[in-house]
Every structure is written in structure tokens, then in C-alpha cells.
Image (cartoon, rainbow, N blue to C red):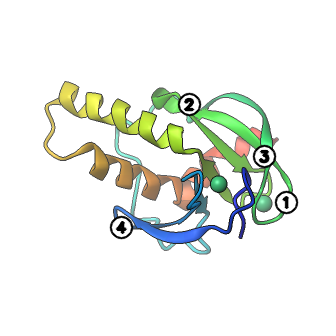
Amino acid sequence: MDCPRDGVTLEIKDHEGIEVDSCPQCEGMWLDHPELDQLEDTRFDEDDSKGTVAYAVRPSDIACPQCSGPMKTFNYRAYDLPLDVCEAEHGFWLDKGEETRVLELMDKRIKDLKRSGSAEAEWGKMLGRLKTKSFSDKIKGLFR
Ligand SMILES: [Zn+2]
Ligand SMILES: [Zn+2]
């Protein structure tokens, strides 16, 4: 599979225990949807189950690295994180800057909540969530 931004072959990397296809050049990441409900045990916490998952849906400027089909860009909830998602639900694309930004936001959130744990761990948890079937079910409405 090649990077939808620069065409470089993606490499599989382990990110906080979650396997992602990562671009060695632009450091963007591709997250597949799981084949089965294998990650169904990773659930949205109470905080995350409230409100709308996706805001500001618009056509994406990249094509799906898996099917070359059109993708849509949306902002992921309160994080204001832009994600590109394949309309045929193959997965998500995250640009490098988007990852850095969400780490900063999570770091701040953890401080606000006086929680133990690092932003990196929170980020790993979030990647896991994005890969769950329940998450993909939640964003199906985008394409209706
Ligand atoms: Zn790239
Ligand atoms: Zn696709």
C-alpha cells in the first residue's frame, strides 16, 4: 500500500500497541478498519459517547490507498482533529501534523482532568478506538 500524499510505500509500525501503516517520508498514518469485531472490547468511555463524532464533513483531497476511491474529511469531535476516511470504509488517514496536534490537545486534557498517564498512552487508546467497529458504525451516517 502506498502513501496517498506522496506515493511512498507504507511501513507497518507499532504505535502504543496499535499496528498502523506509517509513511516513512511524510509520517502520515493509515488505520484500517478491523476485519472482525476483534477490538470491540475497546469502547468509547463515557465522555466520548456524548455528542457528535464528526463535524464539518467535506470532500478530501486524497484518494484511499487501498481502493483509490474518494475519501471524505471530517473533524473528530472535541479534538478538532481532521481525519480522512474512505467512503467504502477501508480506513482512515492521519497526517503527521494532525497527530502532533492531537497529542498536545490530549496532554492539556490530561492536565485538566489531573489524570495520571501520558498523552502518548491516550493517543494509543484513541487510535484503538478509531479502529473499532463501533467507531466505524458511528461514522457510517456521513455517507448517507
Ligand atoms: Zn507520505
Ligand atoms: Zn477505500
Q: State if disc 3 and disc 4 touch (CB < 8 Å).
A: no
Amino acid type of disc 4? Gly
Left or right, 52 with respect to 50, comes to right
Mark 3 or mark 2: which is in front? 3
Mark 2 vs 4, N-terminal side: 4
C-alpha span from label 4 to label 3: 27 Å
As helix, strand or loop, the secondary structure at mark 4 comes to loop
For label 1, being within 8 Å of ligand 2 is answered: yes
For label 4, the residue is 17
Mark 3 vs 2, N-terminal side: 2
> On residue 52, which mark appears?
2
C-alpha span from label 2 to label 4: 27 Å
Mark 2 or mark 4: which is in front? 4
The residue that appears at 52% across and 53% down in the rendered structure is: 130
The residue that appears at 52% across and 38% down in the rendered structure is: 98
Q: Would you call the spot at circle 2 few (<14 residues within 10 Å), some (14-19), or many (20 or more)?
A: few
As helix, strand or loop, the secondary structure at mark 2 comes to loop
Q: State if disc 4 and disc 1 touch (CB < 8 Å).
A: no
Amino acid type of disc 3? Ile
| 71, above or below 133, in the image | above
Mark 1 vs 3, N-terminal side: 3
Mark 1 or mark 2: which is in front? 1
Left or right, 22 with respect to 71, comes to left
C-alpha span from label 1 to label 3: 9 Å
Q: Would you call the spot at circle 4 few (<14 residues within 10 Å), some (14-19), or many (20 or more)?
A: few
For label 1, the residue is 68
For label 4, being within 8 Å of ligand 1 is answered: no
Res. 22 visible in picture: yes
Q: State if disc 2 and disc 3 touch (CB < 8 Å).
A: no
